Amino acid sequence: MGFGMTTILLNIHNAGFFPAVTAIAAMGIFYGGLAQIIAGILEFRKGNTFGVTAFTSYGFFWLTLVAIWYLPTNGSVAPTDKLFLGIYLAMWGIFTLFMFIGSLKANRALQFVFASLTLLFFLLAIHNIMGNDAILTFAGYEGIVCGASAIYLAMAEVINEQFGRTILPIGAHKPH
């Protein structure tokens, strides 16, 4: 939920519906950032390497993104230029591509989240490197879909566990 809701909020902005606002930064710090890091620590305790890697990495992604936006406002560091921000986002795209490969051992809903997130990072990287605003708008819509898929998966896991049966399908992986 932390990843999904924060991703939707940022991408509503990227799609051009709203300016960047404090709500996005606050969600990035607390729900997209800290809550996911806590979830990652809990996954560590369960011995889930994929879960700890995903939750802590994307939790820290949100914290670094907010820091990129706000650290230059105090005058102690230079703002990140678009080209370097594109490289930063491309690195996250590469990491996410590998996480997508790892998700192939999981359910179809999780695979969709990682596939759409991989595409989102590369679209945002291309936008920043090339400066094409049409790509940013498209990325915004794609990011809304990505975030919504993460929300669906999170709620499916909660609701299905609560009811002890499948209410919201997630396309369970069938081992070979």
Image (cartoon, helix red, strand yellow):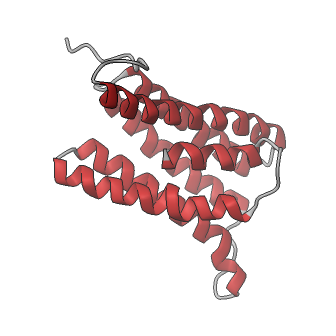
Residue at horizontal 68 percent and vertical 79 percent from the top: 72
Relative to 1, is 71 on the left or the right? right
Residue at horizontal 45 percent and vertical 33 percent from the top: 155
Residue most extreme to the front: 163
Relative to 127, is 44 on the left or the right? left
Residue at horizontal 58 percent and vertical 43 percent from the top: 121
Residue situated in front as seen by the camera: 94 or 20:
20
Residue situated in front as seen by the camera: 116 or 89:
116
Q: Position of residue 11 (x, y in %)?
A: 69, 44
Q: Splitting the image into 4 quarters, where does residue 15 fall?
A: top right
| Quarter of the image where the C terminus is located | top left
Residue at horizontal 43 percent and vertical 45 percent from the top: 95
Residue situated in front as seen by the camera: 96 or 70:
70
Q: Splitting the image into 4 quarters, where does residue 108 fall?
A: top left
Q: Position of residue 170 (x, y in %)?
A: 40, 21
Mark count: 0
Q: Is residue 74 above or below residue 63?
A: below
Q: Position of residue 81 (x, y in %)?
A: 71, 65
Relative to 167, is 24 on the left or the right? right
